[in-house]
Image: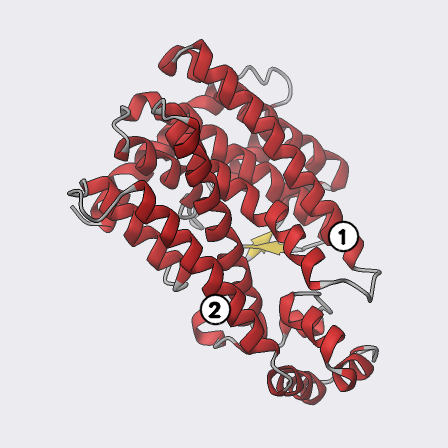
């Protein structure tokens, strides 16, 4: 069975369980809050609900280790609601007007109510992780809940650093990597770890899963940074000038600020013209920023697959689910998802 086939089976189940979990809540006189949440989740228009990569990863790993689908589903629901909570708050903090080509919650309902909707999504995530008590037992639910909150703290640290970078010209490459470990890597790492936790795997396996997910998240983000400057707009769906125009301190930019005096000087200019943006991208490339970023992405990619091979050795016959985890990882890291 291919990843596409499994995806076609599992995504509708994830979606129905997400919606069912929302409908268990009593909104009383705050139905508009419910509407905000369903809008953000993509259930009120034709935009669709997204690929649900993180809950899919949780389910595939739980199934690969022999857990039942119904046992793992509350964890998958929790992961996706947590992810969407972070998106709502990120949009507010970054003042992003659009997500997936349509207005963000705060642009329609205002910042105070968007914060309320984001907080409500966070509550749904907390309630969902506790539902593991019914499907996987009290011990696993308690462990999962503790890890859930530890990960939330990591997410907050990553977001703090991301915002702090905006007014800081002297960010080290090490600090940037620490930021993306929290902002991007922590939740993907937890998505992987949770699959093993639900299946009752031992600590050594959980650590390998966490390391796999962390490397996957870092490599994914660094590739995104590369595409944000040198990507093909026809493939990425956004202008290759957008990151530089927005003065985003991505990995290539931080490398340039640290290693390229000419880039650092030009970066200080306000209201960059399209010609200047192209010039900055060329300077970054010539001083080795793109090569450096690719090396980091390749290093983390190798670490991710090394961990996968330790989890699922080649000398053992891989189950359908194990094979699809390799396939999912390859697609994500090749940006084919």
Horizontal and vertical percent position of residue 8: 25, 44
Q: Is residue 181 something one can see in this rendering?
A: yes
User: How many neighbours does mark 1 have within 10 angstroms: few (below 14), some (14-19), or many (20 or more)?
Assistant: few
* Labelled disc at residue 236: 2
Residue 231 or 297: which is nearer the viewer?
Answer: 297
Q: Would you identify the image quadrant in which residue 137 lies? A: top left
Report crowding for label 2: few under 14, some 14 to 19, many 20 or more residues within 10 A (C-alpha): few
Q: Please tell me which residue is depicted at 54% across the width and 58% down the height of the picture.
A: 221
| Sequence-wise first label, 2 or 1 | 1
Relative to 143, residue 118 above or below: below
SS for callout 1: helix
Give the tally of numbered discs.
2
109 shown above or below 229: above
Proximity of marks 2 and 1: CB atoms separated by less than 8 Å: no
| Gap between marks 2 and 1 measured at Cα | 24 Å
- Of badges 2 and 1, nearer the viewer stands 1
Q: Which mark is residue 272?
A: none
Which residue: 60% across, 15% down? 28
Q: Residue at x 83, y 61 (%)?
A: 168
Which quarter of the image is occupied by the C terminus? bottom left
Q: Is residue 115 left or right of residue 268?
A: left
Disc ID at residue 163 = 1
Give the structural element (helix, strand or loop) at label 2: helix
């Amino acid at each position: 069975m291919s990843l596409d086939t499994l995806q076609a089976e599992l995504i509708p189940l994830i979606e129905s369980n997400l919606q069912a979990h929302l409908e268990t809540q009593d909104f009383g006189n705050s139905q508009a809050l419910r509407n905000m949440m369903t809008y953000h989740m993509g259930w009120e228009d034709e935009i669709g609900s997204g690929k649900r990569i993180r809950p899919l990863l949780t389910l595939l790993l739980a199934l690969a280790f022999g857990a039942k689908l119904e046992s793992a589903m509350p964890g998958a629901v929790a992961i996706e609601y947590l992810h969407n909570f972070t998106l709502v708050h990120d949009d507010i903090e970054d003042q992003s007007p659009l997500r997936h080509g349509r207005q963000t919650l705060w642009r329609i309902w205002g910042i105070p109510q968007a914060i309320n909707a984001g907080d409500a999504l966070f509550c749904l995530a907390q309630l969902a992780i506790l539902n593991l008590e019914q499907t996987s037992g009290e011990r696993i639910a308690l462990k999962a809940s503790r890890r859930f909150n530890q990960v939330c703290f990591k997410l907050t640290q990553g977001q703090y650093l991301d915002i702090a970078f905006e007014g800081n010209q002297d960010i080290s490459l090490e600090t940037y990597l620490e930021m993306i470990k929290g902002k991007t890597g922590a939740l993907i790492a937890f998505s992987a770890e949770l699959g093993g936790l639900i299946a009752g795997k031992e600590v050594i396996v959980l650590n390998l899963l966490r390391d796999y997910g962390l490397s996957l998240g870092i490599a994914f983000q660094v590739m995104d940074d590369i595409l944000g400057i040198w990507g093909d707009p026809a493939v990425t769906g956004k202008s290759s000038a957008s990151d530089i125009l927005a003065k985003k301190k991505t990995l290539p930019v931080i490398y340039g600020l640290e290693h390229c005096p000419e880039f650092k000087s030009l970066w200080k200019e306000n209201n960059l013209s399209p010609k200047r943006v192209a010039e900055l991208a060329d300077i970054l490339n010539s001083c080795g920023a793109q090569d450096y970023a690719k090396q980091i992405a390749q290093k983390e990619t190798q670490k991710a697959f090394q961990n996968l091979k330790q989890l699922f050795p080649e000398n053992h016959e891989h189950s359908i689910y194990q094979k699809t985890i390799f396939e999912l990882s390859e697609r994500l890291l090749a940006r084919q998802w």
